[in-house]
Image: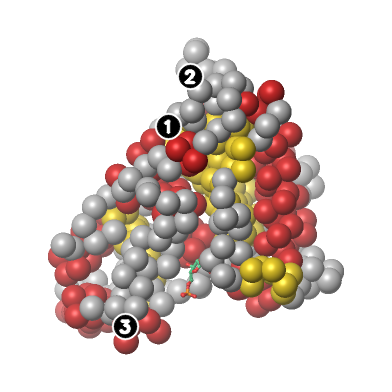
Amino acid sequence: MSQSKLITMDEFTIQETRKFPQATGDLSALLRDLGLAGKIINKQVRKAGLVDILGKHGATNVQGEEQMKLDVFANETLINILKNCSECAGIASEENDNHVSYEDTFSCNAKYVVLFDPLDGSSNIDVNASIGTIFSIYRRVSPLGTTCTEEDFLQPGNKLVAAGYIIYGSSTMMVYATKLGVNGFTLEPSIGEFCLSHPNMQCKENGKIYSINQGNSVKYEDSMLAYLRYCMEESKEDGRPYTQRYIGSMVADMHRTLIKGGIFMYPGDKSAPKGKLRLQYECNPMAFILEAAGGKAVNNHERILDIVPTELHQRVPIFIGSKNMVEKAMEFVGA
Ligand code: P6P
C-alpha cells in the first residue's frame, strides 16, 4: 500500500466520530492515548532480550503471579498516560489489587473508565512469543465531577463502549471494536503511526482450529472430555477435521481466532471451576470484539457479556470464537 493511501488510526477514528454529530471526540482521543501507550510498551518489548528488564521483578501481583519487569513497565505506562489525558476518570488493572481513581479536576470530569491487562501472556516474554495489552472502555456510572468508584468497574460487558487489544507479534497491531464494528491497525515504524490494515474484521461462522491447554484435561468434567473427543476424532467423521493450536497467550490465540476462525477455550475444571481467565479485562473485551465481528462468547450457560461482575478480578470459564463452533461445543458442555 503506497504511503499516500495510508489511513492512520487517528484519521480513521475522527472519520468514525463524524458519523455522530453529537459525538465529542473524547473516545477517539482515549483510543489515541491507548495507542500511544502501546507504542511506548512496544519499544521496550522489542528490546526485551537486550535490556535488563527480563527476569522477575520480585513483586507478585494480585493473582499471586511473579511480576516480570515488563509487566510493571507496561502497567505504569498505561496508568500514567491515562492519568494525563482528559478522557479517563480512573483505571483498573490485572496488576493492581484495587481500582485507581484519578483525583485531578480534569479526570474527575472525564466520562470514561478503562480496565486493562497491561501485558497479557507475560510468561511468554522470555521465549519471544507474542504477548499483548487488552483493554475495556466503559462510560462511568458515578457522577461527573467526583472521583470514580468501584461501581464504575463492575459493569457487565454489555455496557462496554469499546474494547480492544495491542498485540506485540511479528508486527505490532492495535485492534479495537465499537458498536460500528472491528478494525485492525498495523504499526508503521517509519512514521510511528498505527495504520488501517484490517478494515471491518469478521469472524468466520465456521472454522477448524480448536485452541485449549489439553494439559489440563485430567481435571476436566466428563462432558468436556466428550467434546475434546469430538474435536480430535468425530469432527473428522463429520468431514470437518479440527486441528489444535495453542500459544498460551490469550491475545495471540484470540487474534488468530478472529482472523482464521476457530474456538478458543479456557473451561472450568474440578480444581478450578471458574477457569483461569479474568472476566473484566480478558474475557469481556475479547467477547465484545468477537461478537462485534459476528462470533460468539459464552461460559457454560450464558453470554459472557451478560455476566454481572461481583468482584474486580473474578474468573469465568470461556468458550469463544466462530459462532457454529461455539454452539457445537455447547451441545456437549452447555448447561
Ligand atoms: P495456561 C497468560 O498467563 C494467560 O493469562 C492468558 O494469556 C492465556 O490464555 C492463559 O493464561 C494461559 O494459561 O494455564 O494454559 O498457561
Residue 172, compared with residue 89, is above or below; it is: below
Q: Residue at x 36, y 60 (%)?
A: 316
Give the residue pinned by disc 2.
19
In the rendered view, does 181 fall on the left or right side of 84? left
Residue 241, compared with residue 185, is above or below; it is: below
Image quadrant containing the C terminus: bottom left
In the rendered view, does 81 fall on the left or right side of 132? right
Q: Earlier in the sequence, mark 3 or mark 2?
A: 2
Q: Is mark 3 within 8 Å of ligand 1?
A: no
CA–CA distance between discs 3 and 2? 50 Å
Q: Residue at x 84, y 69 (%)?
A: 51
Q: Which image quadrant for residue 238?
A: bottom left
In the rendered view, does 143 fall on the left or right side of 310? right
CA–CA distance between discs 2 and 1? 10 Å
User: SS class of the residue under badge 1?
Assistant: loop
Percent x, y of residue 330: 20, 63
Q: Which image quadrant for residue 228?
A: bottom left
Percent x, y of residue 58: 72, 72
Q: Residue at x 31, y 48 (%)?
A: 307
Q: Which mark is residue 42?
A: none
Q: Which mark is residue 180?
A: 1
Q: Which mark is residue 219?
A: 3
* Amino acid type shown at disc 2: Lys
Percent x, y of residue 178: 45, 35
Q: Residue at x 45, y 34 (%)?
A: 161
Residue 150, compared with residue 321, is above or below; it is: above
Q: Which image quadrant for residue 220?
A: bottom left
Q: Are marks 3 and 1 in contact (CB under 8 Å)?
A: no
Label 2 crowd bin: few (<14), some (14–19), many (20+), radius 10 Å:
few
